[in-house]
Amino acid sequence: MVKKWVFLGILLISGLAACQPQAKPTPPLGKPVYQPFEHGFMLLRAEGDCVYVFGPTANDPDGNIFIAPDAQKPFAYCTAVGTAVAPLPLTPAPGLYLPTGAIGNVWNRYDLQKSLGYATQPEQAYTEPVYLGPTPVPSGNGIPWMMPLAILPDGRGLWCGVRAATNGSCEVDAAE
């Protein structure tokens, strides 16, 4: 009987060791892709699944985040890339560009030429720098009003609201 309990104890201990969470390597991510436009910018996340769109909006002509009308959540800051759509039949002026790839897909789907204009440079993949800008300002209970969602190639942060009073609003740090 003692041998059975020892044997069961060994099985139990070895089984528990096998059930312990194992460290998994982080899957490699691509680099974020940034493209400036006449009136804002678009930023493809490194995961490649959605695009941040920043430019003039109906409620904020100076610039804010674009929230897709078909977003699954009311404050979905990142617009899903989705399936490919046909490019709009447009021809940019000399020195301007039609966006392509995932950024072009979102630009075409939501006809963002009307608010953003044309791209002023080709897409650029970059290594997201460490954010060295201001720290989030907490509210009375310590939860910040806004958090940086992305760091742009020039080091500025794209800050978006994380509380009820700031949801749906984003801003970019002023250029230094």
Image (cartoon, rainbow, N blue to C red):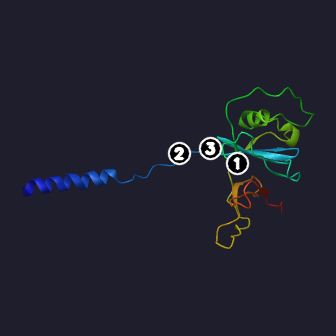
| Foreground label between 1 and 2 | 1
The earlier-in-sequence mark between 3 and 2 is 2
Circles 3 and 2 in contact, beta carbons < 8 Å: no
Q: In the visual, does 107 lie left or right of 16?
A: right
- Distance (Cα) linking label 1 and label 2: 29 Å
Q: Which mark is residue 125?
A: none
Residue 61 percent coordinates (x, y): 89, 51
Q: Nearer the viewer, residue 65 or 158?
A: 65
Secondary structure under badge 3?
loop
Quarter containing the C terminus: bottom right
Kindly identify which residue carries mark 3: 47
Circles 1 and 2 in contact, beta carbons < 8 Å: no
Residue 160 percent coordinates (x, y): 73, 57
The earlier-in-sequence mark between 3 and 1 is 3
Q: Residues within 10 Å of mark 1 (few under 14, many from 20)?
A: few
Q: Residues within 10 Å of mark 2 (few under 14, many from 20)?
A: few
The amino acid pointed to by label 1 is Pro
Q: Nearer the viewer, residue 39 or 144?
A: 144
Q: Residue drawn at (64%, 40%), measured in percent from left and top?
A: 49
Most extreme residue toward the bottom is: 140
Kindly identify which residue carries mark 2: 27
Q: Residue drawn at (79%, 28%), measured in percent from left and top?
A: 87
Q: Is residue 48 above or below residue 4?
A: above
- Distance (Cα) linking label 3 and label 1: 22 Å
Q: Residues within 10 Å of mark 3 (few under 14, many from 20)?
A: few
